[in-house]
C-alpha cells in the first residue's frame, strides 16, 4: 500500500484433509495431510497482481510483498497505515462431530460399509468405487480497507460409483452426499443408503429401453438436483463473465429472462449445505442473493473486484480453491425456489414425455446459453403415468429459453452436490430445484426418430463451453 496500491489483501490458510479410496473391494488409498500457505493480492486500477507462498517467515513474506508490488507496477511514494477491525461472525453453521476428532479408521469404516452394501445389492454389480474426503480449513483474511476475518470451515463428502454388467451391457450408477458438516451427515444419509442408490441406478439402466428422440415435454424431478440451473443459468450470472460480455444475461437487469413462476437464488447461509460458508474468501459475510425474481433478472453474483467496477458492494461470492489462487465470483448453493404445484399433479398433467430423476454431466456455453446435458436416470411418461426407464438420453436447449418455458413448478426441493470447476479452480457447491415441467425440450436418444414428434434439432457435436461438468461437477 505504501507504494500506491488501491487495495491489498492477505489470505492465510491452514488446511487439514483426509481422503479414503476403495476400489476392487479393497482400500486402495488413505491420505492425510496438512497444508499452510499465504496468498497476497494487490489491485492498482484494473490491474491485479497475485502471489503465494508456503513459507511464512517474515523474510519470505516481505519478499513476496515486494514481488507482488513490482508485478502490479506500482508507483512509489507515500505511506499507508491500516487499522484492522475484526468482522463479527454473521451467523453460525453447526458442526456436531468434527471429522478431525474421529480416528482415521472410523472414516475407513464408512467407506467399507458403502462398498459392502453396493456389492451385496445384486450379483450383476461387478465394480464399485467409493471416495470419501473431509477437510478442516482455517482462514485468516485481512485487507487494506481494515477488514479482518477469522473463520473455520468443515466439509465431508462421500461418493459411490457402481458398475453393473449383464447381457453384454455395462451401465454405471453414481450418487454422492456432502455438506458443511461433520460426520453427523452420515446419521441422516448413511453410507448404505448412498451405496444402494448408486447400485440401484446402474441396475435400472441395464433394464432400461433406449431413450426416444425428439422434442417433447420434460419433467425434471426435484431429486434430479439443480444441474440445469447451475450450468444453464448460474454461470451466466457470475459478474466477471457478465462484465466481459461472455454471458447471455449481460445488460438485461430488470428484464424478463424466465417464466414468472421461476425465482433463482444463490445462498451461502443454508445450514449443512456443501456450498455454505460464514465468510467468502475475501472476508465478506455470506448472504442470500436473489438473482431472478418471478422471472425478472434482478442481480448478479459479485466478488470485491467485479463489485468495485460497478461501484457497489460485493454479494459475498468471492471464492478460491486455496491460497494458491486469486478469488473469482462463484456460486454457493444455487436453487430455483419451490412453487405451488403438487409434483404428482405435474406428472398427471403430462400426457407424454420424459421424466428426469437424475442429471448427469454436460456442457454449457455461457455466451449464448446453449447446453447439452446427459440424463443419468430417466423414465417415459405415458398418459400421465411414469412407465418404463430409458437410457442414453441427453437434453439439448438454451438456458433462457428453457426458463421462459417452465409452466409448472412443484412445492418440493431436492439438492445435489459437486465441485464446480472454473478457470482451473474447483470449489464445493450445491444446487437444487423443485419438480419442473418444460413443455418442449429436445431429447436426444438412441431409439431413433419417430417415437416422438420430429425433433427440430439434436445434440450438437460440440459447444465452446466455458464450463464442463461431470459426475462430480
Image: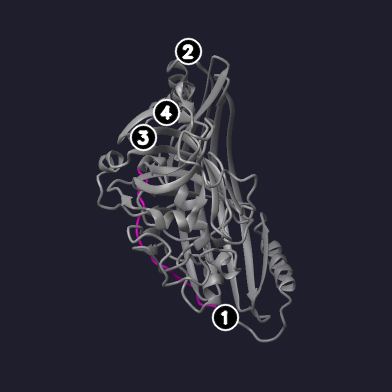
Q: Which of the 4 image quadrants contains residue 389?
A: top left
Which callout, 4 or 2, points at the residue further toward the start of the chain?
2
- Give residue 163's position: percent from left, percent from top: 53, 23
Q: In the drawing, what numbered circle is on residue 123?
A: 2
Closer to viewer: mark 1 or mark 4: 4
Label 2 vs label 3: CA separation?
A: 30 Å
Separation of disc 4 and disc 2 at Cα? 21 Å
State the residue at coordinates (42%, 24%): 200
Q: Which mark is first along the chain, 3 or 2?
A: 2
Q: What element carries label 4?
A: strand
Is the C-beta separation of discs 2 and 3 under 8 Å? no
The residue that mark 3 highlights is: 381
Q: How far apart are marks 1 and 3 (CA)?
A: 67 Å
Of residue 49 and residue 240, the one placed in the foreground of this image is 240
Marks 1,3: beta carbons within 8 A: no
Quickly name the residue at label 4.
389
Q: Which of marks 2 and 3 is in front?
A: 3
Residue beneath label 1, please? 81
Amino acid at each position: 500500500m505504501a507504494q500506491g496500491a488501491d487495495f491489498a489483501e492477505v489470505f492465510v490458510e491452514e488446511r487439514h484433509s483426509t481422503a479414503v479410496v476403495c476400489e476392487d473391494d479393497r482400500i486402495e488409498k488413505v491420505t492425510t495431510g496438512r497444508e499452510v500457505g499465504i496468498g497476497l493480492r494487490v489491485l492498482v486500477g484494473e490491474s491485479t497482481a497475485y502471489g503465494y507462498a508456503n513459507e511464512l517467515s517474515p523474510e519470505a513474506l516481505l519478499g513476496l510483498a515486494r514481488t507482488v508490488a513490482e508485478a502490479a507496477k506500482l508507483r512509489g511514494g507515500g505511506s499507508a497505515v491500516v487499522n484492522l477491525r475484526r468482522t463479527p461472525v454473521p451467523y453460525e453453521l453447526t458442526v456436531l462431530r468434527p471429522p478431525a476428532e474421529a480416528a482415521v479408521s472410523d472414516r475407513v469404516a464408512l467407506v467399507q460399509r458403502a462398498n459392502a452394501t453396493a456389492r451385496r445389492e445384486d450379483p450383476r454389480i461387478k465394480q464399485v468405487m467409493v471416495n470419501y474426503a473431509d477437510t478442516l480449513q482455517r482462514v485468516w483474511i485481512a485487507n487494506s480497507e481494515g477488514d479482518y476475518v477469522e473463520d473455520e470451515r468443515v466439509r465431508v463428502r462421500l461418493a459411490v460409483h457402481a458398475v453393473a454388467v449383464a447381457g453384454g451391457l455395462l451401465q454405471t450408477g453414481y450418487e454422492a452426499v456432502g455438506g458443511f458438516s461433520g460426520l453427523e451427515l452420515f446419521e441422516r444419509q448413511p453410507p448404505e443408503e448412498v451405496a444402494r442408490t448408486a447400485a440401484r441406478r446402474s441396475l435400472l439402466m441395464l433394464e432400461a429401453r433406449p431413450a426416444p428422440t425428439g422434442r417433447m415435454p420434460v419433467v425434471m424431478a426435484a431429486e434430479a438436483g439443480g444441474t440445469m440451473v447451475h450450468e444453464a443459468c448460474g454461470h451466466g450470472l457470475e459478474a466477471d463473465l457478465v462484465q466481459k460480455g461472455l454471458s447471455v444475461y449481460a445488460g438485461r437487469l430488470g428484464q424478463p429472462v424466465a417464466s414468472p413462476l421461476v425465482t433463482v437464488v444463490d445462498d451461502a447461509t443454508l445450514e449443512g449445505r456443501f456450498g455454505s460458508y460464514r465468510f467468502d474468501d475475501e472476508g465478506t459475510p455470506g448472504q442470500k442473493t436473489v438473482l431472478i425474481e418471478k422471472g425478472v433478472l434482478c442481480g448478479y453474483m459479485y466478488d470485491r473486484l467485479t463489485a468495485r467496477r460497478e461501484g457497489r458492494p460485493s454479494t459475498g461470492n468471492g471464492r478460491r480453491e486455496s491460497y494458491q489462487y486469486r478469488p473469482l465470483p462463484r456460486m454457493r448453493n444455487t436453487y430455483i425456489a419451490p412453487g405451488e404445484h403438487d409434483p404428482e399433479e405435474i406428472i398427471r398433467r403430462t400426457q407424454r414425455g420424459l421424466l428426469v430423476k437424475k442429471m448427469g454431466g454436460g456442457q454449457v456455453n455461457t455466451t449464448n446459453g446453449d447446453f447439452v446435458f446427459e440424463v443419468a436416470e430417466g423414465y417415459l411418461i405415458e398418459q400421465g403415468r411414469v412407465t418404463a426407464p430409458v437410457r442414453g438420453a441427453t437434453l439439448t436447449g438454451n438456458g433462457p429459453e428453457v426458463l421462459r418455458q417452465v409452466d409448472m413448478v412443484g412445492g418440493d426441493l431436492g439438492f445435489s452436490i459437486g465441485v464446480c470447476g472454473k478457470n482451473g479452480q474447483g470449489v464445493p457447491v450445491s444446487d437444487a430445484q423443485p419438480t419442473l415441467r418444460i413443455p418442449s425440450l429436445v431429447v436426444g436418444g438412441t431409439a431413433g426418430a419417430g417415437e416422438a414428434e420430429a425433433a427440430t434439432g439434436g445434440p450438437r457435436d460440440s459447444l465452446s463451453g466455458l464450463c464442463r461438468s461431470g459426475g462430480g461437477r
